[in-house]
Image: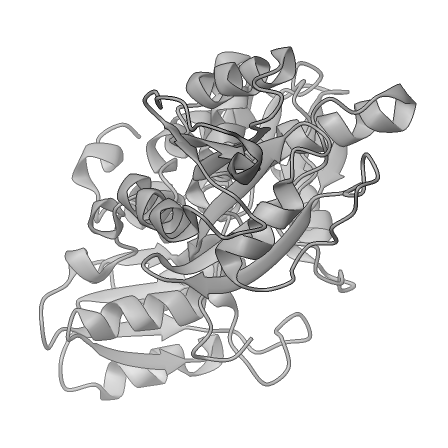
Protein backbone atom coordinates (compact mmCIF):
# COMPACT_ATOMS: atom_id res chain seq x y z
CA UNK A 1 0.00 0.00 0.00
CA UNK A 2 1.35 3.42 -0.90
CA UNK A 3 1.66 6.03 1.79
CA UNK A 4 -0.88 8.22 0.00
CA UNK A 5 -3.49 5.48 -0.23
CA UNK A 6 -6.52 5.59 2.06
CA UNK A 7 -6.83 2.20 3.82
CA UNK A 8 -10.00 0.31 2.89
CA UNK A 9 -11.13 0.29 6.54
CA UNK A 10 -11.12 4.11 6.54
CA UNK A 11 -13.22 4.46 3.38
CA UNK A 12 -16.98 4.93 3.30
CA UNK A 13 -18.40 1.54 2.27
CA UNK A 14 -21.26 1.93 -0.24
CA UNK A 15 -23.22 -1.25 -0.94
CA UNK A 16 -25.49 -1.74 -3.96
CA UNK A 17 -28.35 -4.15 -3.26
CA UNK A 18 -31.47 -5.36 -5.04
CA UNK A 19 -33.09 -8.10 -7.09
CA UNK A 20 -31.55 -9.78 -10.12
CA UNK A 21 -31.64 -7.66 -13.27
CA UNK A 22 -32.74 -4.52 -11.46
CA UNK A 23 -29.66 -2.98 -13.04
CA UNK A 24 -27.37 -2.85 -10.00
CA UNK A 25 -24.18 -3.26 -11.97
CA UNK A 26 -25.25 -0.67 -14.57
CA UNK A 27 -26.00 1.78 -11.74
CA UNK A 28 -22.61 1.05 -10.15
CA UNK A 29 -20.90 1.87 -13.44
CA UNK A 30 -22.97 5.03 -13.93
CA UNK A 31 -22.35 6.41 -10.44
CA UNK A 32 -18.64 5.60 -10.42
CA UNK A 33 -18.10 6.64 -14.02
CA UNK A 34 -16.12 3.44 -14.58
CA UNK A 35 -16.85 -0.02 -15.95
CA UNK A 36 -16.39 -1.68 -12.57
CA UNK A 37 -19.12 -4.30 -12.86
CA UNK A 38 -20.04 -6.79 -15.59
CA UNK A 39 -23.37 -5.89 -17.18
CA UNK A 40 -25.62 -8.50 -18.83
CA UNK A 41 -29.29 -9.23 -19.46
CA UNK A 42 -28.74 -12.69 -17.98
CA UNK A 43 -30.24 -13.13 -14.52
CA UNK A 44 -27.67 -13.41 -11.75
CA UNK A 45 -24.62 -12.15 -13.65
CA UNK A 46 -23.08 -10.90 -10.40
CA UNK A 47 -22.37 -14.10 -8.45
CA UNK A 48 -20.12 -12.76 -5.68
CA UNK A 49 -19.73 -9.36 -4.03
CA UNK A 50 -17.42 -7.18 -6.13
CA UNK A 51 -15.40 -4.60 -4.16
CA UNK A 52 -13.46 -1.66 -5.58
CA UNK A 53 -11.66 1.16 -3.78
CA UNK A 54 -11.94 4.48 -5.57
CA UNK A 55 -12.81 8.16 -5.14
CA UNK A 56 -16.17 9.72 -5.92
CA UNK A 57 -16.90 13.42 -5.65
CA UNK A 58 -18.19 14.84 -3.35
CA UNK A 59 -17.56 11.84 -1.08
CA UNK A 60 -13.83 11.30 -1.55
CA UNK A 61 -12.33 7.84 -0.86
CA UNK A 62 -15.00 5.10 -0.90
CA UNK A 63 -15.29 1.33 -1.17
CA UNK A 64 -17.90 0.29 -3.75
CA UNK A 65 -19.58 -3.09 -3.20
CA UNK A 66 -21.74 -4.64 -5.94
CA UNK A 67 -23.74 -7.56 -4.49
CA UNK A 68 -25.54 -10.58 -6.02
CA UNK A 69 -29.29 -10.46 -6.48
CA UNK A 70 -31.10 -10.83 -3.18
CA UNK A 71 -33.84 -12.87 -4.87
CA UNK A 72 -31.42 -15.50 -6.18
CA UNK A 73 -32.63 -19.10 -6.11
CA UNK A 74 -31.29 -22.59 -5.48
CA UNK A 75 -28.46 -23.76 -3.22
CA UNK A 76 -25.92 -21.39 -4.79
CA UNK A 77 -28.49 -18.62 -4.59
CA UNK A 78 -28.84 -19.14 -0.84
CA UNK A 79 -25.07 -18.90 -0.49
CA UNK A 80 -25.02 -15.63 -2.47
CA UNK A 81 -27.84 -14.22 -0.34
CA UNK A 82 -25.88 -15.14 2.80
CA UNK A 83 -22.86 -13.29 1.42
CA UNK A 84 -25.05 -10.30 0.62
CA UNK A 85 -26.37 -10.24 4.20
CA UNK A 86 -22.81 -10.35 5.54
CA UNK A 87 -21.91 -7.36 3.38
CA UNK A 88 -24.48 -5.34 5.33
CA UNK A 89 -22.30 -5.68 8.43
CA UNK A 90 -19.67 -3.44 6.84
CA UNK A 91 -21.96 -1.15 4.79
CA UNK A 92 -22.02 2.55 5.72
CA UNK A 93 -24.50 3.54 2.99
CA UNK A 94 -26.94 1.16 1.29
CA UNK A 95 -28.29 1.81 -2.20
CA UNK A 96 -31.30 -0.32 -3.12
CA UNK A 97 -31.65 -0.57 -6.90
CA UNK A 98 -35.21 -1.24 -8.10
CA UNK A 99 -36.45 -1.81 -11.66
CA UNK A 100 -38.79 1.19 -12.02
CA UNK A 101 -40.80 -0.60 -14.72
CA UNK A 102 -41.67 -3.37 -12.26
CA UNK A 103 -41.66 -1.68 -8.89
CA UNK A 104 -40.76 -2.92 -5.43
CA UNK A 105 -40.72 -6.64 -4.74
CA UNK A 106 -41.07 -8.47 -1.44
CA UNK A 107 -37.30 -9.00 -1.31
CA UNK A 108 -36.80 -5.23 -1.70
CA UNK A 109 -38.96 -4.66 1.37
CA UNK A 110 -36.93 -7.31 3.22
CA UNK A 111 -33.74 -5.44 2.38
CA UNK A 112 -35.18 -2.14 3.60
CA UNK A 113 -36.14 -3.85 6.86
CA UNK A 114 -32.53 -5.05 7.20
CA UNK A 115 -31.17 -1.54 6.50
CA UNK A 116 -33.37 -0.14 9.26
CA UNK A 117 -32.58 -2.97 11.66
CA UNK A 118 -28.86 -2.31 11.23
CA UNK A 119 -29.31 1.49 11.25
CA UNK A 120 -27.77 1.90 7.81
CA UNK A 121 -28.65 5.12 5.93
CA UNK A 122 -30.11 4.17 2.56
CA UNK A 123 -31.53 5.38 -0.75
CA UNK A 124 -33.97 3.63 -3.05
CA UNK A 125 -32.82 4.11 -6.66
CA UNK A 126 -35.62 3.44 -9.13
CA UNK A 127 -33.58 2.55 -12.19
CA UNK A 128 -34.70 2.49 -15.87
CA UNK A 129 -36.80 5.63 -15.33
CA UNK A 130 -36.23 6.48 -19.00
CA UNK A 131 -38.70 3.69 -19.84
CA UNK A 132 -41.51 5.31 -17.84
CA UNK A 133 -44.05 7.64 -19.44
CA UNK A 134 -44.29 9.66 -16.23
CA UNK A 135 -42.05 9.87 -13.16
CA UNK A 136 -44.14 9.17 -10.02
CA UNK A 137 -44.03 11.31 -6.89
CA UNK A 138 -41.05 10.22 -4.77
CA UNK A 139 -41.17 9.22 -1.12
CA UNK A 140 -38.49 9.77 1.52
CA UNK A 141 -35.23 7.92 0.77
CA UNK A 142 -36.29 7.53 -2.87
CA UNK A 143 -35.33 8.90 -6.28
CA UNK A 144 -35.65 7.99 -9.96
CA UNK A 145 -32.58 7.51 -12.15
CA UNK A 146 -31.53 5.94 -15.43
CA UNK A 147 -28.19 4.18 -15.70
CA UNK A 148 -28.45 4.09 -19.49
CA UNK A 149 -29.18 7.83 -20.05
CA UNK A 150 -27.38 8.98 -16.86
CA UNK A 151 -30.52 10.86 -15.83
CA UNK A 152 -30.43 11.66 -12.10
CA UNK A 153 -26.90 10.27 -11.61
CA UNK A 154 -25.36 13.59 -10.58
CA UNK A 155 -28.23 14.23 -8.16
CA UNK A 156 -27.77 10.70 -6.83
CA UNK A 157 -24.13 11.39 -5.96
CA UNK A 158 -25.21 14.55 -4.16
CA UNK A 159 -27.85 12.65 -2.16
CA UNK A 160 -25.30 10.01 -1.21
CA UNK A 161 -22.97 12.74 0.02
CA UNK A 162 -25.69 14.16 2.27
CA UNK A 163 -26.35 10.86 4.06
CA UNK A 164 -22.68 9.82 4.32
CA UNK A 165 -21.19 9.49 7.83
CA UNK A 166 -19.60 12.76 8.81
CA UNK A 167 -15.81 12.56 9.19
CA UNK A 168 -15.81 14.98 12.10
CA UNK A 169 -17.85 12.50 14.15
CA UNK A 170 -15.21 9.81 13.84
CA UNK A 171 -12.89 9.21 16.80
CA UNK A 172 -9.18 9.72 17.14
CA UNK A 173 -6.57 7.06 17.70
CA UNK A 174 -4.41 8.96 20.16
CA UNK A 175 -3.94 12.55 18.95
CA UNK A 176 -6.51 13.93 21.38
CA UNK A 177 -4.55 12.51 24.33
CA UNK A 178 -1.36 14.51 23.73
CA UNK A 179 -0.41 18.16 23.50
CA UNK A 180 1.55 19.96 20.76
CA UNK A 181 5.31 19.41 21.17
CA UNK A 182 4.80 16.33 23.38
CA UNK A 183 7.27 13.49 22.81
CA UNK A 184 5.69 10.12 22.09
CA UNK A 185 7.83 6.99 21.81
CA UNK A 186 6.64 4.13 19.61
CA UNK A 187 8.10 0.68 20.20
CA UNK A 188 8.15 -1.20 16.90
CA UNK A 189 9.67 -4.70 16.86
CA UNK A 190 11.35 -5.70 13.61
CA UNK A 191 11.25 -9.49 13.46
CA UNK A 192 10.23 -12.25 11.05
CA UNK A 193 6.55 -11.34 11.45
CA UNK A 194 7.10 -7.68 10.53
CA UNK A 195 6.19 -6.80 6.92
CA UNK A 196 9.29 -6.35 4.78
CA UNK A 197 10.08 -2.71 4.04
CA UNK A 198 7.07 -1.14 5.77
CA UNK A 199 5.21 -0.58 9.01
CA UNK A 200 1.92 -2.28 9.78
CA UNK A 201 -1.23 -0.22 9.37
CA UNK A 202 -1.89 0.65 13.06
CA UNK A 203 1.64 1.98 13.35
CA UNK A 204 1.22 4.12 10.22
CA UNK A 205 -2.13 5.47 11.39
CA UNK A 206 -0.84 6.24 14.88
CA UNK A 207 2.13 8.17 13.51
CA UNK A 208 -0.15 10.17 11.21
CA UNK A 209 -2.57 10.96 14.04
CA UNK A 210 0.26 12.10 16.33
CA UNK A 211 1.78 14.31 13.64
CA UNK A 212 -1.62 15.91 13.06
CA UNK A 213 -1.68 16.68 16.80
CA UNK A 214 1.74 18.42 16.38
CA UNK A 215 3.42 15.88 18.66
CA UNK A 216 6.99 14.67 18.14
CA UNK A 217 7.21 10.97 17.31
CA UNK A 218 10.23 8.80 18.03
CA UNK A 219 10.17 5.17 16.87
CA UNK A 220 12.56 2.58 18.32
CA UNK A 221 12.94 -1.19 18.45
CA UNK A 222 12.32 -2.80 21.83
CA UNK A 223 16.03 -3.60 22.12
CA UNK A 224 16.93 0.09 22.07
CA UNK A 225 14.10 1.42 24.26
CA UNK A 226 15.86 1.56 27.63
CA UNK A 227 18.90 3.39 26.21
CA UNK A 228 16.68 5.79 24.28
CA UNK A 229 14.69 6.73 27.40
CA UNK A 230 17.91 7.26 29.37
CA UNK A 231 19.38 9.52 26.69
CA UNK A 232 16.27 11.61 26.09
CA UNK A 233 16.48 15.04 27.63
CA UNK A 234 12.72 15.16 28.03
CA UNK A 235 10.35 12.61 29.54
CA UNK A 236 7.96 11.26 26.90
CA UNK A 237 4.28 12.00 27.36
CA UNK A 238 3.41 8.46 26.29
CA UNK A 239 4.98 5.18 25.17
CA UNK A 240 3.02 3.04 22.70
CA UNK A 241 4.19 -0.50 22.10
CA UNK A 242 3.43 -3.54 20.00
CA UNK A 243 1.55 -5.90 22.33
CA UNK A 244 3.90 -8.82 21.64
CA UNK A 245 6.68 -7.13 23.65
CA UNK A 246 4.40 -5.64 26.32
CA UNK A 247 6.10 -7.25 29.32
CA UNK A 248 9.66 -6.26 28.39
CA UNK A 249 8.61 -2.73 27.47
CA UNK A 250 6.70 -2.32 30.73
CA UNK A 251 9.85 -3.30 32.65
CA UNK A 252 11.94 -0.74 30.72
CA UNK A 253 9.49 2.17 31.00
CA UNK A 254 9.43 3.94 34.40
CA UNK A 255 6.04 3.77 36.15
CA UNK A 256 5.54 7.53 35.94
CA UNK A 257 5.52 7.39 32.12
CA UNK A 258 2.12 6.38 30.64
CA UNK A 259 2.22 3.18 28.60
CA UNK A 260 -0.28 1.56 26.22
CA UNK A 261 -0.32 -0.50 23.03
CA UNK A 262 -1.35 -0.07 19.41
CA UNK A 263 -3.95 -2.80 19.85
CA UNK A 264 -5.58 -1.05 22.80
CA UNK A 265 -5.68 2.24 20.89
CA UNK A 266 -7.25 0.50 17.89
CA UNK A 267 -9.94 -0.97 20.16
CA UNK A 268 -10.72 2.56 21.28
CA UNK A 269 -10.67 3.87 17.70
CA UNK A 270 -13.04 1.15 16.51
CA UNK A 271 -15.44 1.77 19.40
CA UNK A 272 -15.18 -1.36 21.55
CA UNK A 273 -12.50 -0.65 24.16
CA UNK A 274 -14.79 -0.61 27.20
CA UNK A 275 -16.45 -3.88 26.17
CA UNK A 276 -13.02 -5.44 25.64
CA UNK A 277 -11.76 -4.37 29.07
CA UNK A 278 -14.88 -5.78 30.72
CA UNK A 279 -14.65 -9.03 28.75
CA UNK A 280 -11.04 -9.96 29.45
CA UNK A 281 -11.70 -11.12 33.03
CA UNK A 282 -13.42 -14.18 31.51
CA UNK A 283 -9.91 -15.58 31.16
CA UNK A 284 -10.13 -16.41 34.88
CA UNK A 285 -13.22 -18.58 34.47
CA UNK A 286 -12.02 -20.73 31.55
CA UNK A 287 -12.21 -24.47 32.18
CA UNK A 288 -10.85 -27.60 30.55
CA UNK A 289 -12.50 -28.13 27.16
CA UNK A 290 -13.74 -24.54 26.78
CA UNK A 291 -13.61 -23.13 23.27
CA UNK A 292 -11.92 -19.77 22.64
CA UNK A 293 -12.36 -18.00 19.31
CA UNK A 294 -9.37 -15.95 18.16
CA UNK A 295 -10.44 -13.73 15.28
CA UNK A 296 -8.36 -11.61 12.91
CA UNK A 297 -9.68 -9.09 10.44
CA UNK A 298 -6.94 -9.74 7.90
CA UNK A 299 -5.70 -12.82 6.06
CA UNK A 300 -1.92 -12.37 6.24
CA UNK A 301 0.46 -15.27 5.75
CA UNK A 302 0.98 -16.82 9.18
CA UNK A 303 4.55 -17.00 10.45
CA UNK A 304 5.94 -19.80 12.61
CA UNK A 305 5.40 -17.72 15.78
CA UNK A 306 2.24 -15.90 14.69
CA UNK A 307 0.60 -13.74 17.37
CA UNK A 308 -2.97 -14.97 16.83
CA UNK A 309 -2.51 -18.62 16.00
CA UNK A 310 0.55 -19.43 18.11
CA UNK A 311 1.55 -16.90 20.78
CA UNK A 312 -1.81 -15.99 22.32
CA UNK A 313 -3.00 -19.65 22.44
CA UNK A 314 0.29 -20.60 24.12
CA UNK A 315 0.10 -17.73 26.64
CA UNK A 316 -3.57 -18.52 27.37
CA UNK A 317 -2.90 -22.16 28.10
CA UNK A 318 0.15 -21.34 30.25
CA UNK A 319 -1.74 -18.67 32.20
CA UNK A 320 -4.91 -20.69 32.82
CA UNK A 321 -3.34 -24.13 33.07
CA UNK A 322 -6.40 -25.43 31.23
CA UNK A 323 -6.80 -27.68 28.20
CA UNK A 324 -8.49 -25.12 25.94
CA UNK A 325 -9.83 -25.63 22.43
CA UNK A 326 -8.63 -22.75 20.25
CA UNK A 327 -10.47 -21.94 17.03
CA UNK A 328 -9.39 -19.30 14.51
CA UNK A 329 -11.26 -17.08 12.08
CA UNK A 330 -9.68 -14.65 9.63
CA UNK A 331 -10.66 -11.96 7.18
CA UNK A 332 -14.38 -11.52 6.56
CA UNK A 333 -15.26 -14.88 8.12
CA UNK A 334 -16.85 -14.51 11.54
CA UNK A 335 -19.44 -16.92 12.99
CA UNK A 336 -22.82 -15.37 13.78
CA UNK A 337 -23.49 -18.11 16.33
CA UNK A 338 -20.99 -17.61 19.14
CA UNK A 339 -22.74 -19.87 21.66
CA UNK A 340 -20.05 -22.61 21.45
CA UNK A 341 -17.40 -20.18 22.74
CA UNK A 342 -16.53 -19.10 26.26
CA UNK A 343 -14.47 -16.13 25.04
CA UNK A 344 -13.82 -14.20 21.82
CA UNK A 345 -10.41 -12.54 21.44
CA UNK A 346 -10.33 -10.19 18.45
CA UNK A 347 -7.44 -8.39 16.80
CA UNK A 348 -7.33 -4.59 16.82
CA UNK A 349 -9.51 -4.55 13.70
CA UNK A 350 -7.38 -2.19 11.62
CA UNK A 351 -8.42 -3.90 8.35
CA UNK A 352 -12.14 -3.75 9.18
CA UNK A 353 -14.27 -0.64 9.19
CA UNK A 354 -15.82 0.45 12.46
CA UNK A 355 -19.29 -0.77 11.54
CA UNK A 356 -18.11 -4.35 11.02
CA UNK A 357 -16.01 -4.46 14.19
CA UNK A 358 -18.91 -3.12 16.25
CA UNK A 359 -21.22 -5.67 14.62
CA UNK A 360 -18.92 -8.48 15.78
CA UNK A 361 -18.80 -7.00 19.26
CA UNK A 362 -22.60 -6.73 19.33
CA UNK A 363 -22.97 -10.37 18.24
CA UNK A 364 -20.96 -11.36 21.30
CA UNK A 365 -22.69 -8.97 23.70
CA UNK A 366 -26.17 -10.01 22.55
CA UNK A 367 -25.24 -13.68 23.07
CA UNK A 368 -23.59 -12.88 26.42
CA UNK A 369 -20.18 -14.11 25.25
CA UNK A 370 -17.20 -12.15 26.67
CA UNK A 371 -15.43 -10.17 23.94
CA UNK A 372 -11.94 -8.70 24.20
CA UNK A 373 -8.88 -8.11 22.03
CA UNK A 374 -5.24 -9.10 21.60
CA UNK A 375 -3.54 -6.22 23.40
CA UNK A 376 -5.90 -6.23 26.37
CA UNK A 377 -5.62 -10.00 26.78
CA UNK A 378 -1.83 -9.90 26.68
CA UNK A 379 -1.65 -6.99 29.14
CA UNK A 380 -4.08 -8.77 31.48
CA UNK A 381 -2.14 -12.03 31.51
CA UNK A 382 1.11 -10.14 32.12
CA UNK A 383 -0.37 -8.19 35.03
CA UNK A 384 -0.08 -4.76 33.43
CA UNK A 385 -3.62 -4.09 32.17
CA UNK A 386 -4.37 -1.37 34.73
CA UNK A 387 -1.23 0.46 33.71
CA UNK A 388 -1.94 -0.08 30.01
CA UNK A 389 -5.33 1.65 30.18
CA UNK A 390 -4.21 4.24 32.72
CA UNK A 391 -4.56 6.99 30.11
CA UNK A 392 -8.31 6.27 30.32
CA UNK A 393 -9.07 6.80 34.05
CA UNK A 394 -12.67 5.56 33.82
CA UNK A 395 -11.46 2.22 32.44
CA UNK A 396 -8.56 1.91 34.85
CA UNK A 397 -11.06 2.32 37.71
CA UNK A 398 -12.91 -0.78 36.48
CA UNK A 399 -9.90 -3.06 36.97
Query: Could you say which is closer to the camera, residue 348 or residue 58?
Result: 58
Coloring applied to the structure: one colour
Where residue 328 appears, as percent x and y from the top left, is 73, 39
**Furthest-left residue in this view:** 180
Q: Does the image show residue 296?
A: no
Q: Is residue 174 visible in this depiction of the protein?
A: yes
Q: Is residue 72 rendered to the left or right of residue 266?
A: right
Residue 68 horizontal/vertical position (percent):
72, 36
* Residue projecting furthest to the right: 75
Residue found 69% across the figure and 42% down from its top? 313
> Percent from the top left, x then y, of residue 152?
41, 46
* Residue at far front of view: 133
Quarter of the image with the C terminus is top left
Question: Which residue is found at the position 31% from the left and 84% from the top?
Answer: 228
Q: Residue at x 69, y 54 (%)?
A: 37
144 displayed left or right of 159: right
Q: Quadrant of residue 218?
A: bottom left
* 211 sits to left or right of 14: left
- The image quarter containing residue 106 is top right
Quarter of the image for the N terminus: give it: bottom right
**Residue drawn 63% across and 20% down?**
342
- Residue 96: percent from the left, percent from the top? 53, 31
265, 359: nearer the viewer: 359
Q: Quadrant of residue 29?
A: bottom right
Query: Quick check: 141 above or below 105?
Result: below
Amino acid sequence: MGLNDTPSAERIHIGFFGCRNAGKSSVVNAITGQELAVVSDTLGTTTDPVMKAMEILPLGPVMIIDTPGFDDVGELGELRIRKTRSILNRTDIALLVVDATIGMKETDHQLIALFREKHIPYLILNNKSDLLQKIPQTEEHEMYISASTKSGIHECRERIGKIAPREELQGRIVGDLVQPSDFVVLVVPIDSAAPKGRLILPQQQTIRDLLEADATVLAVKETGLRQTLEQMGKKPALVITDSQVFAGVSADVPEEIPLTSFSILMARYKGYLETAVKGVSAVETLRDGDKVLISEGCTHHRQCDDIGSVKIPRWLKNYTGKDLQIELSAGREFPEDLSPYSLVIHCGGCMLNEREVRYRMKCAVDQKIPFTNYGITIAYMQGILKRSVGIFPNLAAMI
